[in-house]
Amino acid sequence: MADAVRAKVAVGEYATESVVIRDGLRVLLAPDQAVEDRLCGDVAAAGDALKSDPSQALSLDGVKARLAAAHKLTSAKA
């Protein structure tokens, strides 16, 4: 891996080895950041909406029914 990092710098693709590693870490961490953004955005907003209007809540049976329907659709497409 160290040779690969040095090669990126040698061909001029990156200015320094540090920049290669920093870029690689950004790619590695991007999925984690996407999950974090989703949790902080959509999920938090849904939670806030539910707090302000609890009538939007689904029962456990309602959640199970929606998941079963989604699973059925997914399985049918596969």
Image (tube, rainbow, N blue to C red):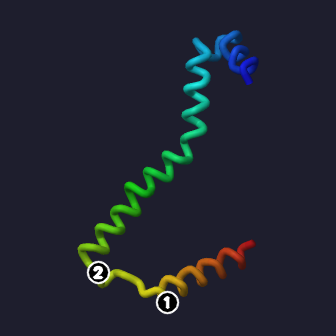
Residue 31 at x, y = what percent? 56, 47
Horizontal arrangement in the rendering, residue 20 relative to residue 59 (left or right)? right
Name the residue tied to disc 1.
61
Which residue is outermost to the front?
2
**Quick check: 38 above or below 64?**
above
State the SS at label 2: helix
The residue located at (55%, 40%) in the rendering is 29
In this view, the residue in front, 73 or 37, is: 37
- The answer to which image quadrant residue 59 occupies is bottom left
Looking at the figure, which quarter contains the C terminus? bottom right
Q: Which mark is residue 28?
A: none
Q: Is residue 46 above or below residue 67?
A: above
Q: Identify residue for label 2.
A: 54
The N terminus sits in image quarter: top right
Image location (x, y in percent) of residue 23:
57, 28
Is 54 on the left-hand or right-hand side of 21?
A: left
Locate residue 21, reporting x and y percent. Answer: 60, 24
| As drawn, 51 above or below 41 | below
Estimate the spatial distance between the alpha carbons at disc 1 and disc 2, rounded to whole Å: 16 Å
Tag 2: amino acid: Pro
